Amino acid sequence: MDANDIVIIPLGTISPYPKGDRNCPAFLIKYKDQKMLLDCGNGSTRLLNIPNDLNNLHIFLTHYHFDHISDISALQYASLTHHNIGTLENKIKIYLPDNDINGIRNTIISNKESYSEYLSINNKVKYQIDNLTISFEDNASHSIESYMIQLKNQDTKIVYTSDIGPTNFKKLIDFCSNSDILICESSFLRKYDISGSNKNHFTAFDAATLAKMSNSKQLILTHFWPEEDRDRYLEEAVKVFENTQTAEEGKELVLRRKNYGRKVY
Ligand SMILES: [Zn+2]
């Protein structure tokens, strides 16, 4: 492992419920000694290496749908218990949207059984974690306020869309433009949405179209229906965008910086 490697590990790839050895949405990104957890859906905590992964842990909650946040209380409690027994020195950091939908934000930040600090997510704020700049944008196309996340340094740009709909494509293309890795939801298959009636989520076709139009280099599909074979998503996407993979729990993707600025995956 190279010191500058960025490692992306899917911890949860299905929605709206966990099934078998698959969990609801979560991606862990490791860079140097920092860990960034993008959402923490039901069951995803069991794939974390606790207590080690609690150190320098930044948890980003993209929106307040339960399939994306349901394990936050488990992580909060884990942080407190490991702090109490001396195996966690620094607080975990939880970043969450300012807009308090149904009181969920307040429920999370008022949880006393946690060793954590809380930071805002909105369109304007940026955070620096090592040399990665983390920024956000409300995609304005999901059923509630939901943020896309961008992680960027001089070599690499990673975008995690979280939940998005096809109604606001221009904005999505701008935010995802020239990504090295585009982690994109694909809740549906186009064959089940011939009428185009779905407005709150993407199809695999939509994800591939976004990857192509944003000039992204590699597409990782996620957020699958638990009862569907994920190869069907891949088949639909590769017709539009060839460099596509499906996310699978625990299957690491390593981004390595090479000489001449060329990256090898
Ligand atoms: Zn959602």
Image (spheres, grey):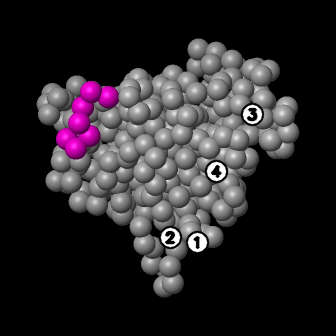
Query: Marks 1 and 2, Cα distance to the nearest angstrom?
Result: 7 Å
Give percent across and percent down for residue 245: 31, 53
Query: Earlier along the polypeptide chain: callout 2 or callout 4?
Result: 4
Q: Residue at x 78, y 30 (%)?
A: 80
Residue that carries the numbered disc 1 in the rendered image: 2
Give percent across and percent down for residue 63: 54, 30
Query: Earlier along the polypeptide chain: callout 1 or callout 3?
Result: 1
Q: Nearer the viewer, mark 2 or mark 3?
A: 3
Query: Marks 4 and 3, Cα distance to the nearest angstrom?
Result: 14 Å
Hey, what amino acid is under mark 1?
Answer: Asp
Hey, what amino acid is under mark 3?
Answer: Ser
Residue that carries the numbered disc 2 in the rendered image: 256
Q: With 14 as the anchor, is 123 left or right in this view?
A: right
Query: Marks 2 and 3, Cα distance to the nearest angstrom?
Result: 31 Å
| Residue projecting furthest to the top | 102
Q: Nearer the viewer, residue 172 or 264?
A: 264
Task: Estimate how packed mark 3 is, as few (under 14), some (14 to 19) or many (20 or more) residues with alpha carbons within 10 Å.
Answer: many
